[in-house]
Image: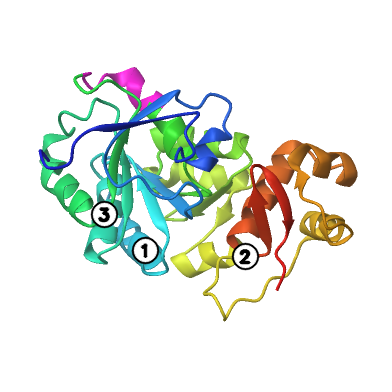
Amino acid sequence: MACFAIKTVSLEDASYPRLLKEIRNPPATLFYRGVLPDPDAVTIAIVGTRKATDEGRIIAKGIAGDLSKKGIIVVSGLALGIDGAAHAGVVASAGVTIAVLANGLNFVYPLSHENLAEKILALGGCLLSEYEPDEPALPYKFLERNRIVAGLSLATVVIEAPKRSGALVTARLAAEEGREVFVAPGGVKNRNYEGSHMLIRNGARLVADASQVLEDLNLLEPGQQTFDFDRDENKIMETLSRTADFLTLDKLSEITHLETNTINQKITFLLLAGFLTEIEGRFQLKRK
């Protein structure tokens, strides 16, 4: 990885990931190797247990690869099991993926994923961390890392999460930030899915493949997509249609009476779907 120097981006920089800026405690500085994606890139996290079954790895690799083929950047933690399978699925599709590490970027943890990390960088992806380059991977850092995985991502897909799983923490953090959580179901007696099924019971969306994730997020192929606005999206679109001005999030919240988290989520969807224009944190309908 010597040819990919460690660089930094601060919270005040325009290149800092937009979605990550929106969480309650974004890192003040990010260290990265490779190519930092565009701040408004479409990113989806895939997470799950380190002790994954062969079936779980196949599901993770398939969903990640299919999302990548649609131009989505897949985010995960480079851990053993589901994380590694997700990154491998993107690499197999020659796509772009972000690996968020719980240690400094002078080394790869686990060491067995060093070759995978090299492939990620070679394909234009990046390794990212909030820790100084020589900091070791310690248990508490993996939980801190999870907020970055969730914060970078428009949505999080959970595959094989037991009752005690870091993936459940990532899913909770995503939900708390108003992001969508998707879960791939499994056998009712398989302990690797106990946490997954708990998430579904608590309101997460059940999905079987990448197309269902894209459909639920209204991220269909350009030129072929239909967009059925929900009630909140209609409020935002109608409000913006009545003015030629660019409106701030606060102003939109004031006019529509929608919560800030809801406004953030819906604005992100509408931007990614190509209906809005943004200039310095202000929004307007995109004029044809």
Q: Spatial distance from mark 1 to mark 3, Cα to Cα?
A: 13 Å
Instruction: Report the residue marked by disc 3.
Output: 124
The secondary structure type at the circle numbered 1 is helix
Cβ–Cβ below 8 Å for labels 3 and 2?
no
Quadrant hosting residue 139:
top left
* 18 or 114: nearer the viewer: 18
Residue 68, given in percent of the width and then of the height, sits at 36, 63
Instruction: Report the residue marked by disc 1.
Output: 68
Quadrant hosting residue 126:
top left
User: Considering only order in the chain, which callout, 1 or 2, is on the residue closer to the N terminus?
Assistant: 1
Residue range (magenta): 135-144
- Classify residue 13 as left or right of residue 1: right
Q: Inspect the image, locate mark 1, and give the three-letter code of the amino acid beneath it.
A: Ser
Above or below, 129 against 270 in this view is above
- Seen at 26% across and 39% down, the residue is 79
Q: Inspect the image, locate mark 2, and give the three-letter code of the amino acid beneath it.
A: Gly
- Classify residue 272 as left or right of residue 109: right
Instruction: Report the residue marked by disc 2.
Output: 274
* 139 or 234: nearer the viewer: 234
Residue lying furthest bottom: 224
Residue 196, given in percent of the width and then of the height, sits at 48, 45
Q: Inspect the image, locate mark 3, and give the three-letter code of the amino acid beneath it.
A: Gly
Q: Is 137 included in the stretch rendered in magenta?
A: yes
Q: Spatial distance from mark 2 to mark 1, Cα to Cα?
A: 19 Å
